[in-house]
Image (cartoon, grey):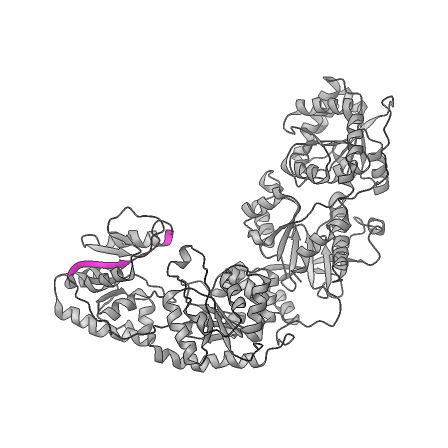
Amino acid sequence: MAVDGKTRVMWLLNHTTLRKFELGQLAALGINEVFTPKNFPYDEGNLSASVDYSTDSTLTIPSHSLQILNQENWYENPSAKAWEIANNYFDIVIIGFFPQQIKATIRNFRGVIILRAFGLAAGFSYTQLLKKWFSTGEFLRLQKIYNRFWFGADYEHLRDNETGILFERFCFLPVGLQQAEVSRAKWTGEQRKIFFVCPRIGTSPYYRAVYDSFKRNFSGFEYVIGGAQPVPVNDHNVIGFVPKEIHEQNMQRLRVMFYHSTEQNHIHYHPFEAIQFGMPLIFMAGGMLDRLGGKELPGRCKSVKEARRKIRRIMQDDWNFIEKVRRSQVCLLESMNFEKCATYWRENFKQVLDSLKSIDNSSSVKAVSHSNRKPRIAVILPIGYRGGTLRGAKMLAEEIELGSKQAGEPVDVVFAHLDDPSLYTSEDFADLPPSIQRRPFRWRILDAQEARRAMAYAGIDIPLTDFLYQVPDDGIMQFYDCDLWVVVSDRLQHCLLPVRPYVLMVYNYLQRYVPCLPSGLNQQFIKVAHAAEKVLVTTEFTRQDAIQYAGIPADRVVKVPILAPIWNKESSFILPSDENLDAYFLWTTNLALHKNHVNAFKALAIYYEKYGGRLKCHISGFGSNEILRSDLPHLRSVSSIYEKSRFLQSCIRIKGELSENAYRAQLAGAAFLWHPCLIDSGTFSVVEAASLGVPALSSDYPAMREISAQFGLNLCWMDPHNPDHMGRQLKEMEIMHNKLRVLLQQKKEKLFTQTLENWAPAYWEAIKTCL
């Protein structure tokens, strides 16, 4: 409740006609203190919007608080200070079906929320829209405020299209007109033209089709087309937006209005305006006007042919028919009558006011309850990752725990990985801090019926639309005891069962550049990302891919610093001897398509045969011992390149997957690290190398440029599509590696500031808002 006990409403819409009506209804209920927004998006969805300062004088709140409220954009993400004021002084917020407005309000407002709805096209529902717009966490948040949320629809039958919370918390608040009588019956009709309203012809495919259909169906008649046009239309009959006085003149002087819509769940205001002015209305059957009493009216038409015939009679001065249409159509205003609507507002708004009395921060019959414990976050490795991704996932778990402690908001962290002894041993996780619990799991696949049963058992009512879902099964609680899941990658073949909010850590959208995924699987991965609370990325390159390629809303994509292990903080680096006959450089790789094996082997042959390369090449990494005998299509030509070159056979040493200590020793002894990958999210092996004083030669692509800049690596570059350039750069590294090592020594300060301790606040800030 408001701090001073007064009932106040924030009416966060800007529709001009609707504002007059609804503020009048609130006043009739005794609610006279109403805030209205002073900013709105200047887009096609707000062509009927305006700003009204008149209600400010009714508000008995501090003037400086009102000033802050007036400066905010209530359609997007208002400031924390604005929400603090809203929670201090207002009991009820009325919002429209704008995705960002809905999300911000359910996340921040502690009073009663009324979500207004005015009808959609047939076959669509608002529940479907929420399913499209909301993450799993946002659905769970909406359910948590169940007892103080209302779906305030303007037509009673809209409930039939909804399910879940929108069905259960339905509140019929009809829309109408402040004055719905034929009190301005000034129609003269001297201009023998059809008045047709069709906005946004040049920018909306829907309205363009309506416009084209009207012109085709009513050729031979003169017409005037009203409605705001953001883009000019090459038709002198399209007048666009006009001042109120001109609009009223058109209503008075034009002979007839034609209303095309057969939508059963939505209707525009202009047919009622025509009736108020006394203009005859010819309309198509099957739409909302039928529901409002229009089925037996003479202006109703079952076909375009019938509509043309009736309009022709009006144009030819059939005044008996004209007066019959005008007298009969007045009944359509009855549903818009202020007093009739007020009856429903009084009856149904009582539910809203009653729900104010039961509000407290912990009450919700639908909320999932937890004991008074620290929040628990699960970091989940969804598939059998090893190498850099495994190390990155462990660092992420450590970073979350560390960031929460630094902020004085400690959480418990669980690290989850596949329960596969052939893939993981306890040694793989020996470097996890003892405070982070390790929990093996297996994926359990649920069909729709099993999923619904599991959701009911968890006390969660979220619409399920898929045939299959997956849930991590640890044999105990299926991670229900965790408040947030952080999944390291989007590689999920089915949607996660929406029992907990989740965050995705997505390192790249490699499939945009390399054909490494079937189309269906790619779409599934993108679908999984759209249901996440947030998608974390580590480079601007991947952030842009997430937004532009995967279509994830920009406000849900968060760039966090690249994490990489820093192994050596000694004051100086060891310089290897140029006389060492066993000197080598290290190439760490795996069998993935984007690792560029064919060009890399061609480059190695060129390095040895054309440029007289003297350094051996050691190859390590998960699966690397299969490179020369793999039957993967992209690796079949590698063995022939190898077999044709005695230099490759004598100079290449394949080490396979190494333990961390063995890998570190290999890396420390290398002249340099070689990274010939085509493209990806970058590799932190170059950071590991630099921390040991080892320079690196890398393929030149955006993510690696970002890594080099963040860590101050001064990487050397090559073109991964040009084997000759790669070979030439290998020779250059052979010559320059000791000088580059000295340069790393000189610039090591920047490298050694890139610690988990320094970056923990950024990670915690990104994660904590999802709890």
Residue 253 percent location from the top left of the image: 19, 62
Q: Position of residue 320 (x, y in %)?
A: 13, 71
Q: For the C terminus, which image quadrant?
A: bottom right
Residue 583, image quadrant: top right
Count of number-bearing discs: 0
Residues 503 and 513: in front is: 503
Picture quadrant where residue 45 is located:
bottom left
Which residue is pictured at 35% across the width and 66% down the height?
A: 267
Image position of 613 (left or right of 50): right
Q: Residue at x 68, y 38 (%)?
A: 709
Instruction: Judge whether residue 194 is colored magenta.
Output: yes
Q: On the image, which quarter does residue 461 sit in?
A: bottom right
Question: In which quadrant of the rendered image does the N terminus lie?
Answer: bottom right
Q: Nearer the viewer, residue 637 or 267?
A: 267
Please name whichever residue, 506 or 233, is drawn nearer the observer in this view of the structure: 233
Name which residue lies at 84% across and 38% down: 664
Compared to residue 617, the image places residue 344 above or below, namely: below
Q: Which residues are magenta?
A: 185-206
For residue 676, above or below residue 149: above
Residue 117, position in %: x, y? 44, 68
